[in-house]
Image (cartoon, helix red, strand yellow):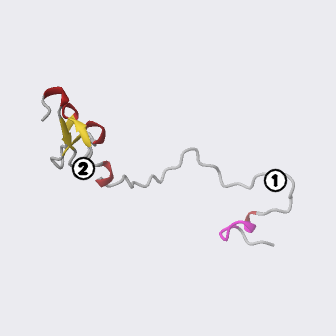
């Protein structure tokens, strides 16, 4: 049986063999895993995927454009009523 720096342990997550000095206890589950397989501060409980996303709707527009008919290049027959149903009636 190896002792000291020659010791090994079996990872609870993968079953792989790691050096005993590279073992880490997972903070959420209590599993003993290798340092390369550790999730660090994130676990099942405090994972960023378990948090609700920020779904605030920001109705203010940055640099809104005025509602005017701009000069067109190429097709001079274009009118606003061709693109929206809310425009003035087409004549």
Q: Is residue 7 above or below residue 90?
A: above
Residue lying furthest top: 5
> At 47% from the left edge and 54% from the top edge, which residue is drawn?
59
Query: In the rendered image, which residue does mark 1 sit on?
Result: 72
Look at the image and tell me whether residue 6 can be seen.
yes
The image shows residue 26, relative to residue 57, as above or below, that is above
Helix, strand or loop at disc 1? loop
Q: For marks 2 and 1, give the CA distance.
A: 65 Å
In this rendered view, identify the residue nearer to me: 40 or 36: 36
Residue 7: say if magenta: no
Type of secondary structure dominating the magenta stretch: loop
User: x%, y% of residue 70?
Assistant: 76, 52
Q: What label does residue 33 carry, if any?
A: none
Q: Name the spot of residue 75 as percent of width and height, x first.
A: 86, 58
The front one of 11 and 1 is 1
Q: Point out the image quarter for the N terminus.
A: top left
Q: Position of residue 77 (x, y in %)?
A: 85, 62
Residue indicated by mark 2: 13
Residue 41 at least partly seen? no
Q: Is residue 18 left or right of residue 59?
A: left
Q: Nearer the viewer, mark 2 or mark 1?
A: 2
87 shown above or below 28: below
Q: Please name the residue shown 22% across and 51% down the image.
A: 45
Where are the magenta residues, as a range? Answer: 81-87
Q: Residues within 10 Å of mark 1 (few under 14, many from 20)?
A: few
The quadrant in which the C terminus is found is bottom right
């Amino acid at each position: 049986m190896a002792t000291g720096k020659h010791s090994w342990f079996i990872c609870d997550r993968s079953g792989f063999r790691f050096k005993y000095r590279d073992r880490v206890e997972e903070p959420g589950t209590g599993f003993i895993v290798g340092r390369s397989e550790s999730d660090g501060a994130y676990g099942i409980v405090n994972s960023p995927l378990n948090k609700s996303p920020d779904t605030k709707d920001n109705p203010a527009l940055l640099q809104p454009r005025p509602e005017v008919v701009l000069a067109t290049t190429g097709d001079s027959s274009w009118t606003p009523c061709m693109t929206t149903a809310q425009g003035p009636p087409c004549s």
